[in-house]
Amino acid sequence: MVRSAPSKRCYVLGVGMTKFIKPRGKVDYTELGFEAGVKAMPAAQVTYDDVDQGVACYCYGDSTCGQRVFYQFGMTQIPIYNVNNNCSTGSTGLHIGRDVISNGGADCVLVIGFEKMNPGSLQSFWNDRENPTGTNVADAGIEYMEKYGASNADFAEITRVNHEHSQRNPYSQFQQVAALPLMEEPAAVLVSEEFLNSRPHLRSQAVLIAGQALTTDAPSLFNRSSIDLMGYDMSKAAAEIALRQDGRTTADVQVVELHDCFSANEMVTIDALGLSEKGKAHELVRNGDITYGGKYVINPSGGLISKGHPLAPPVALQHNLGLGGAAVVTVYERADGQTATKVSDEEVGKINGLGYNPAVVAKGFTAEQASKVRSKNQKSAWALGEAEAKVLARF
């Protein structure tokens, strides 16, 4: 396992996101992939002709769905990877993009995560056996209560805080404090140091991937602890590696996005990432240290459940699903080293090229904006089809 920081830096220069929606058969993943990409590229001031490689992240879908999404921007014959790593799929896509750039394989990589899920709760394709996920996570929550003194109220508070945060996220599906076919697609433009140096005016908006690690399970997975079965050790290892690459500790962390497929998963993950002393994650929750005004702001987006739990797209700080799983931990910093200051919505709209602030409102794009980012000479009207027209009609 590579534990040192890569020799070449990688930056996130532009991002785009669609709203988390229930498509009810009316919206296809191709439309949402196109929307996310069109939103991401203007912020980075790139077109598809600048993209050296593409990474498509999804769990449910046919082979090479990535090509179907990326061809809408152009058929430039670049490498396109299709990634499936269960709940860590989106983060794994970022990890691949960073690895490619850090090893000199590309200067600009477009990563798009998408998912078109079936109605109702998560289902297994294997009907000859029970799906153990819910039971395993519940057992981990019970084990945490018995070992460390957490209560049902602590787990409920995690859920309440996440839904409180989701009210501020215009892209969240569930925006009530207490409260599924689902679709959503985010996209990110990753660039190299050389790329950024050639466009120095963009450095102030670039976000450095200062540390990142992808880990899988250790033998402790089978030690009869439900907490370990959920991926405690691999999450802990990934956090330690990522922070070490950046020369940081959890004391330097201010904002955290982590995997809250269940409130028990978030409790255990807070502990595994080292955000609390071992066995004291529930004290962090009780003290109000997971929200605004506390030690950390955890899941300011509202978390995974507030988005309706799409498996592949969310590229948050950490993802895992225990048995047969993977964890990705990423540490982000401002590339210019400056302290964050408040920026007006108008200024944000100018910077990202969309004309609005996506942090406070969920909107689309114009036909002119879409035309600017598509390949100039290698675009295909056949590959695009009606996707652009359908997206424009929704807005």
Image (tube, rainbow, N blue to C red):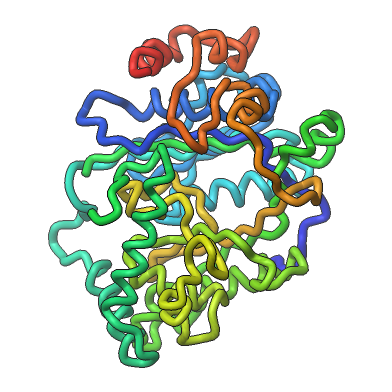
Q: Position of residue 314 (x, y in %)?
A: 45, 48
Q: Is residue 318 shown to the viewer in this render?
A: no
Residue at the limit of the structure toward the left, as seen here: 128
Q: Is residue 346 shown to the viewer in this render?
A: yes
Quick check: 13 above or below 255?
Answer: above
Give the quarter of the image for residue 207: top right
What is the quadrant of the N terminus in the image? Answer: bottom right
Q: Is residue 196 left or right of residue 349?
A: right
Give the quarter of the image for residue 324: bottom left
Q: Is residue 260 left or right of residue 380?
A: left
Q: Position of residue 103 (x, y in %)?
A: 76, 48
Q: Position of residue 259 (x, y in %)?
A: 43, 61
- Identified at 52% across, 71% down, the residue is 235
- Identified at 77% across, 32% down, the residue is 202
What is the quadrant of the C terminus in the image? Answer: top left
Quick check: 347 above or below 95?
Answer: above
In the image, 146 versus 115, the foreground residue is 146
- Identified at 51% across, 60% down, the residue is 292
- Identified at 53% across, 36% down, the residue is 187
Q: How many marks?
A: 0
In the image, 63 versus 339, the foreground residue is 339
Q: Position of residue 263 (x, y in %)?
A: 33, 68
